[in-house]
Amino acid sequence: MPTDTPPTRKIWLLYDTACPACDYYCNLVRIRESVGELVLVDAREPGPLLDEVTALGLDIDQGMVLKVDEQLYYGADAIHALALLGSDSGFFNRINYQVFRSARLARVLYPVLRACRNLLLKVLRKTRINNLDLDNNDRF
């Protein structure tokens, strides 16, 4: 009797790869294998997930998006959901879980982290993604 492994469930994380801090975080964070495979998506490249986020009016310059099945988590909710789905492998993932397992703490810390990100991208002279095509919204 052949043993077929079921297809791995994909969990999608849409974020700005031009942000060194975001890129570092997203490449370190791990989810439990039993949950699925974390797929990192560059928000600076066109694609169906960015189109979906844009259609919902979510500004990707203001928060990352985690897609689990058909559910989207945005900003603080995304980082909180990642912590709950997270693996306990490695120091970084254990700390990530301890800090962001609380939805309340994630909502308090996320705007601070976003402000630091925006300052970093301003210093690096990066442009905004501006997926919502807002006027005068090209620079940080």
Image (cartoon, grey):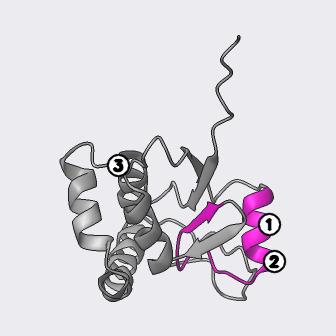
Instruction: Write down the residue under mark 3.
Output: 87
Q: Which mark is residue 16?
A: none
Residue 82 point in image, percent of width and height: 44, 62
Residue 137 point in image, percent of width and height: 63, 84
Q: Please tell me which residue is depicted at 38% across the width and 72% down the height of the picture.
A: 117
Residue 29 point in image, percent of width and height: 37, 51
Mark 3 packing: few (<14 Cα in 10 Å), some, or many (20+)?
A: many
Mark 2 packing: few (<14 Cα in 10 Å), some, or many (20+)?
A: few
Left of 53 or right of it: where is 126? Answer: left
For the residue labelled by badge 1, is the local secondary structure a helix, a strand or a loop?
Answer: helix
**The quadrant where residue 115 appears:** bottom left
Left of 52 or right of it: where is 41? Answer: left
Cα gap from disc 2 to disc 3, whole angstroms? 31 Å
Residue 133 point in image, percent of width and height: 76, 80
Position of 19 relative to 36 (above/below) = below
Position of 130 relative to 126 (above/below) = below
Looking at marks 3 and 1 on the same chain, the residue that comes earlier in the sequence is marked by 1
Instruction: Write down the residue under mark 2.
Output: 55
Q: What range of the chain is rendered magenta?
A: 48-68
Q: Is residue 104 magenta?
A: no
Cα gap from disc 2 to disc 1, whole angstroms? 6 Å
- Whether residues under marks 2 and 1 lie with C-beta atoms below 8 angstroms apart, the answer is yes
- Whether residues under marks 2 and 3 lie with C-beta atoms below 8 angstroms apart, the answer is no
Front one among 112 and 99: 99
Q: Which mark is residue 51?
A: 1
For the residue labelled by badge 2, is the local secondary structure a helix, a strand or a loop?
Answer: helix
For the residue labelled by badge 3, is the local secondary structure a helix, a strand or a loop?
Answer: loop
User: Amino acid type of disc 2?
Assistant: Ala
Front one among 134 and 14: 14
Cα gap from disc 3 to disc 1, whole angstroms? 29 Å
